[in-house]
Amino acid sequence: MKPFTIDTTNGICAALFIFLGGFFALQSLGLEIGTAFRMGPGYFPLVLAIVLILLGAVILVEAVRFESEPIGHVAWRGMLFILPAPIFFGLTVRGLGFLPSIFLTALIASFASGRMRPLTALVLSAGLTLFAFLVFSYALGLPFRRFGPWLAM
Amino acid sequence: MELLDNLALGFSTATTLVNLGFCLIGVLLGTLIGVLPGIGATATIAMLLPITFQIGDPVSSLIMLAGIYYGAQYGGSTTAILINMPGESSSAVTAIDGYQMAKNGRAGAALAIAAIGSFFAGTVSTFLVAIFAPPLTAIALEFGAAEYFSLMIVGLVSSVALAHGSIVKALAMVVLGLLLGIVGTDIYTGTPRFTLGIREYADGLNFVAVAVGVFGVAEILRNLENEHERSVMIRSVSGLMPTREDFRRMAAPIVRGTIIGSALGILPGGGAILAAFASYTVEKRISKNPGEFGKGAVEGVAGPESANNAGAQTSFIPMLTLGIPANPVMALMIGAMIIQGIVPGPNVATEQPALFWGIIASMWIGNLMLIILNLPLIGLWVKLLTIPYYVLFPIIMAFCSIGVYSVNTNIYDLYAVAFFGLLGYLLTKLRCEPAPLLLGFVLGPLLEENLRRAMILARGDPTTFVTRPISAGLLFIAFAVLVVVFLPAVKKKREEVFVEEN
């Protein structure tokens, strides 16, 4: 008999869909389901969540039966620096103000590439901040505080 | 004649100085981001979308958005021809012969042929949109909730059929998109759903944040996987003018490409990709020297580029008349309309004729601007190709952050960008296409609303969907499409098509 193997790509994919389907299904059960005539807020999402779980199960069966392409390179460094950039901007745009926040956001994102040198990153972020000031803050007049309360002594 | 009156209204709307200006900015920005290698039209639009919301007037903002779309598409063809790196699968076909032409020292001619083909296709298909949109709108006005529900099912199913890779995965992506789309307050009862208790998500997940995350951020991460030097072989492009021989050879493929593209573009589910591929196959089949294809055949650039552009244009028809997106780009347009307070659907044409016809007229103007602007600016775009990627993406990330935040000044939208960036990247790594997810996301609330309304109208009798003739017909189409893509023979053929295209 063939040893039990599971394809990594499809296995993870199936797990992800089943997990997400499970999350939505559990949440829907906490809502009023209603009847097919008068559907409550939970009816349609519950149906969809069950379908998602079933599709996940189909992918799982495929994962056990067939092999597929490997996952390949994962941009770990990219994820480590790119994903926090918008979060950082969100956390600081009110406190630090628009300009310091966008400077630091660009700086964080810069380090996602191994090719970026610190000086280049500083110059790039500074130039970007100047551009953002001129275009977004000055020309388009977006109502963001340029410097926030955290910087006021 | 009504058509002429309508077009006159459209052109008078689109040619005001302000709107011409926004169209110009849109085309320029679209090309600018579109030529950045590895960034396709959808990602470009997702990134630039927030900028258009800074314009108060919905007409101007949608005109600019349409300009961005054409610009991004043309930019994609430029990278396909010059460095063999198509940003989007629809320009992958152009890359086959376009890049070979560039290698033979005919980059200028290839770019000009692409531009001329796109312009011709754009002109014809703009008229097609103007002719076919009003009658379709009239039909759509007769639609009830059941018909709308079935129509959306057709759209979603076709997006599955045209996605790359596994059909089951594409189906799962649609369902996940639908679920994500209904996050937020339930319209009937006011109950918050799936918001995890976060008040800021009560209005639903921000569409721009989802699009920027799934398309923009995920694409940046993918490009960061293996950073290798791009070889830009062409430092300067000369000889833009095609020869008389080129003109003779490209005329017929452009006309055929336009016809194929216009027909396939209307199909919900993203016909432009299919159109480019179909046109290439047709040209190769009827050519007297099929051996030239793949080695720099003029027909192999002219046909697919025209088909691609015609398809891109006619995909506006279902969007404008029915409010149903035919591809992710149209999903972005619908999202933009909703944010501007316009309910997409057949009522747009009657309630906002200036907007409706203004967009149609601006399509032609946008195409004209492309051809006037881009040929002289080619030198600039070639320079852009030499900017190292590591300089670009901090800029893109900063602008995405500013852009998303500026839509609603809601910092939770920025957290959503990061989350959907991660989810989008993860799903791409697991070989799931993001396009069906975005379509599902846009249609989720509409689908649920129409389902619930139809069921209330039918007093809880689900047979309403099959006893109403139009609805039954639409559901039959959806069912047939599903059956066909699961047929073993078609499944195999479909895999071949996508393999060849890559």
Image (cartoon, coloured by chain):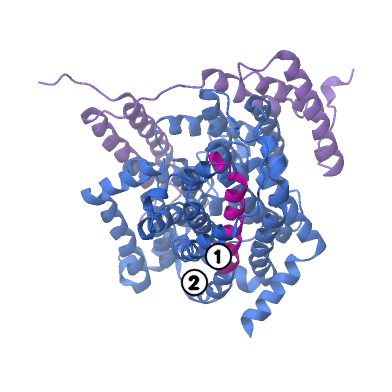
Assign the magenta stretch its main secondary structure: helix
Residue at the outermost right position: A153
Q: Give whichever of B191, B65 is nearer the camera.
A: B65
Letter of the chain that mark 2 sits on in the rendering: B
Q: Colour of chain B?
A: blue
- The percent coordinates of residue B410 (x first, y second) are 69, 38
Q: Quadrant of residue A151?
A: top right
- The percent coordinates of residue B98 (x first, y second) are 52, 46
What quarter of the picture does the C terminus of chain B occupy?
top left
Label 2 – label 1 distance at C-alpha: 8 Å
Give the residue at mark 2: B140
Q: Quadrant of residue B402?
A: top right
Q: Colour of chain A?
A: purple
Q: Which mark is residue B345?
A: 1
Q: In what element is the residue under mark 1?
A: loop
Q: Is residue B296 above or below residue B158?
A: above
- The percent coordinates of residue B463 (x first, y second) are 30, 66
